[in-house]
Image: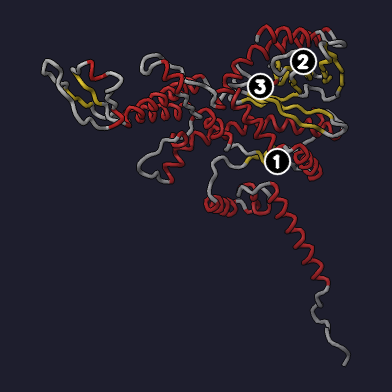
Amino acid sequence: MAAVNMELAGQVASAAGLEPGDAALVRELMTVWREHRASNLEREDYYLGHVSVKDLGIAMPASLAKKINPRVDWPRKAVHALADRSIFNGYTCADEQTSKALRAICESNQLERLYRKNLIGELKHCCGFWTVTDGGGYPVISAYPATAAAALWDDARKAIRAGLVVAESKKMPGDTERVPTVVHLLTDDSLVVLTRDGGSWVAEYREHSMGRCLMEPMAHGATLERPFGTSRISRSVMSITDDAIRQRARMEVAAEAATLPQTWLLGTYKKMLNDGNKYDASMGAVNEITKDPDGDKPTVWQSAQLQMAPLTEYLRQLACQMSAVTNVPVSFFGVSNDNPSSSDAIAASLEPLVIDAKNLNRDNGTALRNVAYMALAVANGTDFATERDAGHEINPRFLSPAYPSTVSLSDALLKQVQALPKLANSTVAYEMLDYTDEQIQRIESDAKKAQAGAAIASLFEPKEGENGGGAD
């Protein structure tokens, strides 16, 4: 596979019409993509539950290990437990015209749904990528997972220096698997579309005036050493998952053994065990045991039935380890307590996950803000810096990751309005109550209609002192 990728990198880099400097970028980016592709696909397998039993060759025969094929979806649960608490709900903006433009851009690109798809890819692999391109005067926002994209980080500018995405893959004649057929190279001044034409590649340059690369990363848990973040499916998560799958296999074998009592005949005469006179434990009864020619008779011994409790307790311990690694409550992994938890205990168990979600929203909010600036630049025919410095105070909005109750939200808002009366006349009050952007629009629209209706009605009301009847 590595040799195929190296050959592919050489083919793409030698595309007709590609400038030498950009050819070097393509080689470098394809190398980055190739080096991380194996680990990204491995995490994809854990997410999808495509990992089989890694038998140690001790507790069960090899023949059984091949037949039993249990699955554990804990990595998927670790991803979705955090993703479900990061809900993007449009942008807030101080300028009404810009706010309407952003709302139209979000609707046309289905940005809220696209965010969740990109978010899941970010948590699975370590990062997801946004691209903003010109679709004929209108911004086209696209998302790519790390399995189909690569980028080079510029630490001085805190932005991507150059990026590459696999925009299209097909199974071509002579190929055994799907291969890239359209690749986009994104730089500070151009979008290079590399297209496979038969066995060769052709480059098409599309210059832009954005003033920066058209790609924006959305990294999970980024650090100085890892600007593109780390995967939610860490090595610890994969190791615990392997243990859990192996334990599930042991439990399957143990369950089969515990179904029937294990009865043993000690000291039997060999003729008693021929094909015509077999003792089968599954029959559950032995009617007669005769003596052998020497007058001896076999001894019947029945072992104690196997207990499943120690096996399930070990699986519970593995779930607790997974909970400690991912900050996801252990109940999410199918382990429940005998006594129901109180509301305070549930809130306390969710607090680490809520904190992770808040940090995730803060980091992803920066990426979404930059995407908004680039989208507005395409729509307005400007550049990134112009939209960023326009002073429109654009901020992405997320619903509360804590999922508070309506009663608690209302009580908190009432106390804050009493302390800050100005808050009652601000749309921030709606946001604090976790109303969606659509609901806020409807509330504002209905309020304006009611005000207009009241103003019209006031014009037809008789003034004080006027005679509303006819002539005397």
- The tag earlier along the polypeptide, 2 or 3, is 3
Give the CA distance from mark 3 to mark 1.
24 Å
Q: Which element is circle 1 on?
A: strand
Q: Which element is circle 3 on?
A: helix
Q: Which residue is mark 3?
A: 146
Residue 446, image x and y in percent?
Answer: 73, 58
Q: Is residue 309 visible?
A: no
Taking the spot 71% from the left edge, 12% from the top edge, the residue there is 30
* Labelled pair 3, 1 in contact (Cβ < 8 Å): no
Q: Nearer the viewer, mark 2 or mark 3?
A: 2
Disc 3 residue crowd, few under 14, some 14–19, many 20+, Cα 10 Å: many
- The tag earlier along the polypeptide, 3 or 1, is 1
Residue 236, image x and y in percent?
Answer: 48, 20
Give the CA distance from mark 2 to mark 1.
44 Å
Q: Is residue 449 above or below residue 113?
A: below
Disc 2 residue crowd, few under 14, some 14–19, many 20+, Cα 10 Å: few
Give the CA distance from mark 2 to mark 3.
26 Å
Q: Which element is circle 2 on?
A: loop
- The tag earlier along the polypeptide, 2 or 1, is 1
Taking the spot 38% from the left edge, 30% from the top edge, the residue there is 316
Q: Which residue is mark 1?
A: 90
